[in-house]
Image (cartoon, rainbow, N blue to C red):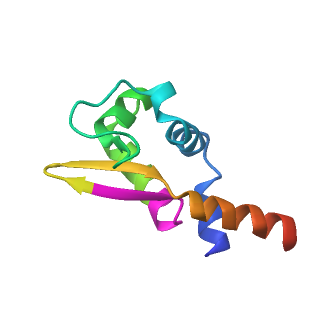
Amino acid sequence: MDQLEIFKALSNRSRLEILQWLKEPEKYFPVQESVGFDEAGVCVGQIQKKAGLTQSTVSEYLSTLQRAGLIKATRIGQWTYYKRNEDAFKELGELISNVL
C-alpha cells in the first residue's frame, strides 16, 4: 500500500465523491442492462455523466484512484466498469488506526 498515492488520490473532492458513489452504486446510478453493479461495477460513462465533468477529467481521476489501489477496473467488450476495492479500504482503516 503506497500511502502517498492513496492520500494524493483522496485529496480531491470529485474523486472522493466518486468513491462515495461507488460504495452504494444502486443509490446513485441507474440500473445497468448488461451487467450488475456487484459483478463488474459502474460503467465509466455513467460516472462521467453523474460527475458532470469531461470524459478526459473523469478518466484521469479514475486512473489516479486505480493507481492508488482504491478501485478496480473490469473491461467488458468496449466498456470499462469500476468498483471499489473494499480490501484496500480495510487496509487503509487499519493503517490509520494503528500507524498514523
Task: Residue at 61%, 40% (x, y): give it.
Answer: 13
Q: Residue at x 38, y 40 (%)?
A: 37
Residue 65 highlighted magenta (yes or no): yes
Residue at point 59%, 68% (across, down): 5
Q: Position of residue 91 (x, y in %)?
A: 68, 67
Q: Nearer the viewer, residue 36 or 9?
A: 36
86 w.r.t. 41: above or below: below
Towards the viewer: 6 or 29? 29
- In the image, 43 versus 57, the foreground residue is 43
For residue 100, say whether it is visible: no
**Picture coordinates of residue 99, whole percent (x, y):** 85, 74
Q: Which quarter of the picture shows residue 43?
A: top left
Q: Which residues are magenta?
A: 64-74
Residue 98 against residue 59 in the figure, above or below? below
Q: Is residue 96 left or right of residue 89?
A: right
> In the picture, residue 92 is in which quadrant?
bottom right
Q: Quadrant of the C terminus?
A: bottom right
Q: Nearer the viewer, residue 55 or 83?
A: 83
Residue lying at 65% horizontally and 52% vertically, measured from the top left = 11
Q: Quadrant of the N terminus?
A: bottom right
User: How many numbered discs sit on the rendered protein?
Assistant: 0
In the image, residue 83 lies at what x, y percent? Answer: 44, 50
Residue positioned most to the left: 77
Task: Decide if residue 22 is in sight here.
Answer: yes
Residue 36 appears left or right of 27: left
Image quadrant in which you'd find residue 8? bottom right
Residue 59 is inside the magenta segment = no
Q: Position of residue 57 (x, y in %)?
A: 39, 44
Q: Is residue 54 above or below residue 75?
A: above
